[in-house]
Amino acid sequence: MTPFVADVLIPVGKIVAVILYPMVMVVVMIWLERRVVALMQLRLGPNRVGFQGLAQPVADAV
């Protein structure tokens, strides 16, 4: 391994992973919460935007 990879790319990759993981988990948790609430209320969940409603949080933000 070159010094550049070991000194720069690996720490940057770790930082990106630490930042992206919570962001992805927020989208997943919002999706799961909406699906569970929809089941409890016997109604359709957020399945109108994107694949299986995964774009719903983005649509809400816009």
Image: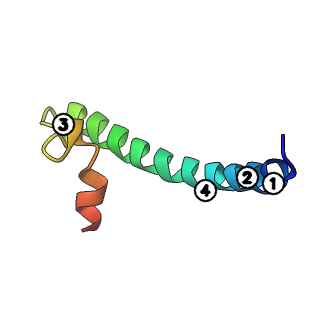
The tag earlier along the polypeptide, 3 or 2, is 2
Within 10 Å of the Cα at label 3, are there few (<14), some (14-19), or many (20+) other Cα atoms? few
Outermost residue, front side: 2
- Which residue is disc 2 drawn over? 9
- Which residue is disc 4 drawn over? 19
- Which residue is disc 1 drawn over? 4
Q: Secondary structure at mark 1?
A: helix
Determine the CA span between mark 1 and mark 2: 7 Å
Q: Is residue 8 above or below residue 34?
A: below
Q: Nearer the viewer, mark 4 or mark 1?
A: 1
Number of callouts = 4
Determine the CA span between mark 3 and mark 2: 48 Å
Amino acid at pointer 3? Gln
The tag earlier along the polypeptide, 3 or 1, is 1
- Which residue is disc 3 drawn over? 41
- Residue at image x 36%, y 37%? 32
The tag earlier along the polypeptide, 4 or 1, is 1
Determine the CA span between mark 3 and mark 4: 34 Å
Determine the CA span between mark 4 and mark 2: 15 Å
Residue 50 in the image, given as x and y percentages of width and height: 20, 44
Amino acid at pointer 4? Ile
Q: Quadrant of the C terminus?
A: bottom left
- Name the image quarter holding residue 37: top left
